[in-house]
Amino acid sequence: MRGSLNSRMVIGASLILAVFVLLTALALERAFEDSARAAVQERLRSQLYLLMGETEVDDNGNILLPASSTLARLNQPHSGLYATVFSQSRPIWSSRSVMGAGYPFVKQLDTGEEHFQHSQQTDQDWFILGYGVVWQTDPRTIPITYSLLEDGQAFQQQIREYRHTLWTWLLAMAALLLTAQLLVLRWGLRPLREVAKDLQAIEQGRQDGLRGNYPAELQGLTGNLNTLLAHERAQQQRYRHALADLAHSLKTPLAILHGSSNQPDTVREQVIRMQKSVDYQLQRAATAGRGGLNSSLDVNAVVNGLLTALHKVHADKVVEVENAIPAGLSLRADKGDMTELLGNLLDNAFKWCRSRVQVRAEKLDTRTLLHVEDDGVGIPTEQAELILTRGVRADESVPGHGIGLAMVRDIVAAYGGELQITDSPLGGAHFIVSLPQ
């Protein structure tokens, strides 16, 4: 799915904010409407109790109410507040505000029963409150139902005003929150924009890596990218050096061939020399080297495979091999590189040993040490120093320890490791390869 990460986050957050504002508005509006309706009911109840207080009984047991109520609105026609008192569903008193018929009064309720209703019709909105009582007169009781009506237009106007105020403030707050959200997103995504800017600078050749001070969440990504870039640069450098060295290595053999066309042995010798140079430089160029994306490699599996092959290659020689590499030991390295490195060291040991070869490994805090030893004649100190000298080409290496050890030296260098050659307690050479974990 394509698109801007910033746009996705803005759209997603805006949708969430819109839903939140809508649900908040509906909840607050419902709560206010319920509260306002309860206030209307309480007000009507108070007015009804006041009307009950104005009721009197004459000597004949008749219910009497004043022609003019102390509630001013009941004395004004069409005031919006109306009252009627019923006895056995027959009206016995109505307020002056009642003009004509058609009001939905509650006409009969049981003693102590209260009825409250919000009646909304197409042309009218009413709040209705009725309350049933029994008036005791000797020798009889008179059931009475007090009924009040209030026009709901004022209530609806109050709801409309509240709704307008509520939505105005909520929309203003939503706009403010959205603006703050955009600013926070812009600030939060700035490291990603810096990564993109650094990558563009790398593509244009203005810098060679990601240099920004990135937050912890991006350091893994930027670190791996820098490692990958460094690995690619090292690989290109190896290609360039390999091609330059190959061209230099072929100059002398080609010159000799040019003047030795009638000397078959010389030609054959120079062709073999050229083939070795080509093989070495191609292998050197193909070295993967250490990178942040190397997977873990089981060292024992590589060594066991090499030992099986070497026993067949050197079948004319009885060699006792001691494999002391711990089970489960792994390295973050390319399998081809480790096969080439260990293969050359073990082949060299098989070639120069008398009868014993030992291979072992140990893991330190930050490095892994690989040891290959034999019981042969060893390597003189001056020759060992020549082998370890950087810049020595394969065709100039020590006789008998040429291209193979030169390849080992280059692979170890590609992984940022170290190669040492010492004397072994077995009597021969002891190669120590130190690689970072």
Image: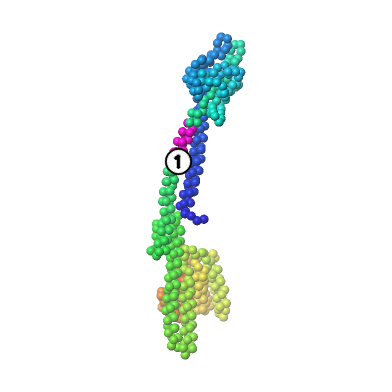
Say what secondary structure mark 1 lies in.
Answer: helix
Q: Which residue is mark 1?
A: 171
Q: Is residue 434 above or below residue 139?
A: below
**Can residue 136 be seen from the camera position used here?**
yes
- Quick check: can you spot residue 359? no
Residue 15 to residue 121: above or below: below
Coordinates of residue 233 in the picture (x, y in percent): 43, 67
Q: Residue at x 50, y 31 (%)?
A: 156
Badge 1 crowding class, 10 Å Cα cut-off, few under 14, some 14 to 19, many 20 or more, is some
| Pick the front one: 120 or 402 | 120
Residue 209, given in percent of the width and then of the height, sits at 41, 62
Residue lying farthest to the left in this orientation: 206
Q: Percent position (x, y) of residue 185?
A: 43, 50
- Of the pair 182 and 270, the residue shown nearer to us: 182
Q: Is residue 232 left or right of residue 117?
A: left
For residue 204, which quarter of the picture?
Answer: bottom left
| Rendered residue at 57%/73% (across/down) | 308
Q: What's the coloring here?
A: rainbow
Say what amino acid the circle numbered 1 marks. Answer: Leu
Above or below residue 295? Residue 87 is above
Task: Tell me if residue 161 is in the magenta stretch.
Answer: yes
Residue 210 located left or right of residue 294:
left
* Residue 148 in picture, x, y percent from top left: 54, 22
Task: Identify the residue at image location x=43%, y=62%.
Answer: 226
395 or 173, nearer to the observer: 173
Q: State the residue at coordinates (48%, 69%).
A: 288
* Most common secondary structure along the magenta stretch: helix
Instruction: Give the magenta part as a residue range.
Output: 158-171
